[in-house]
C-alpha cells in the first residue's frame, strides 16, 4: 500500500530547524550541504516571532525549535565581539542580551533583537577573551563598560 504524497502550503511547509541547527523536511533530515547552506542563508525573522525561509522568489514559514541562528565564530572588531552567524552574516554583539542557559550555552539576541542565537562551543570559547568574573558572576568587558551575563534557570 503506497501512501500519497503530503501537500504543503506556505503556512505548513513541513520544514523544521532543530535545536542543533539541523534542517528537517517531513521528519527526514536535510543533509545536502548546498541545500543546508541555502536554507541557513534564507532564514529570516517574521512578525509574531515566526520565521520565514526565502529561496529566490519562493517563501514559506518554518518551525524553529530553539534558536534560529547559531554563532559560529567571534571576531574582534576594535575591541568589540563581532558574531559570525549561521546565515553567513556578521553583527556586533549586543552585550545586554547575553545569557547563559541551564545547559551552559551562551545565547544572545540578533537581527535587531528579533531572533535568538546560540553560541557553538568554539564561538563560546572565543568569546572567553571578553569574559571576566566579578563578584561570583561573569561579565563581558567591552570598551563601553562591563555587562553582566544573565543566567537562565530551569523553572
Image (tube, rainbow, N blue to C red):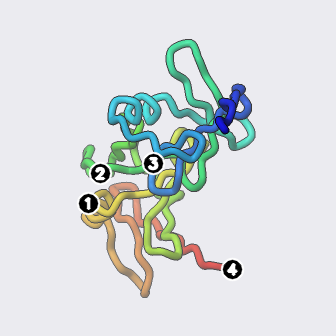
Q: Whole-Å distance between the Cαs marked 1 and 4?
A: 29 Å
User: Mark 2 touching mark 3, by CB under 8 A?
Assistant: no
Q: Is 12 placed left or right of 154 in the picture?
A: right
Vertical order, 123 against 31 (above or below): below
Q: Earlier in the sequence, mark 2 or mark 4?
A: 2
x%, y% of residue 31? Answer: 38, 41
Label 4 residue SS = loop
Point out the tag, 1 or 4, that comes first from the N-terminus.
1
Quarter of the image where the N terminus is located: top right
The residue carrying mark 3 is 22
Callout 2 environment at 10 Å: few (<14), some (14 to 19), or many (20+)?
Answer: many
Q: Residue at x 25, y 49 (%)?
A: 76
- Compared across the picture, whether 81 is left or right of 30 comes to left
Reading the image, the residue beneath label 2 is 74
- The answer to whether 147 appears left or right of 128 in the picture is right
- The foreground one among 83 and 144 is 83
Amino acid at each position: 500500500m503506497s501512501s500519497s504524497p503530503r501537500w504543503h502550503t506556505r503556512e505548513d511547509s513541513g520544514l523544521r530547524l532543530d535545536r542543533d541547527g539541523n534542517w528537517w523536511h517531513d521528519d527526514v533530515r536535510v543533509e545536502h550541504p548546498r541545500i543546508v547552506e541555502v536554507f541557513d542563508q534564507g532564514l529570516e525573522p517574521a512578525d509574531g516571532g515566526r520565521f520565514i525561509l526565502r529561496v529566490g522568489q519562493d517563501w514559506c514559514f518554518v518551525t524553529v525549535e530553539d534558536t534560529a541562528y547559531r554563532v559560529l565564530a567571534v571576531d574582534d572588531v576594535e575591541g568589540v565581539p563581532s558574531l559570525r552567524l549561521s546565515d553567513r552574516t556578521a553583527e556586533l554583539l549586543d552585550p545586554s542580551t547575553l545569557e547563559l542557559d541551564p545547559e551552559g550555552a551562551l545565547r544572545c539576541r540578533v537581527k535587531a533583537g528579533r531572533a535568538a542565537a546560540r553560541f557553538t562551543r568554539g564561538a563560546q570559547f572565543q568569546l572567553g577573551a571578553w569574559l571576566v568574573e566579578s563578584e561570583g558572576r561573569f561579565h563581558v568587558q567591552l570598551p563601553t563598560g562591563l555587562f553582566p551575563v544573565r543566567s537562565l534557570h530551569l523553572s
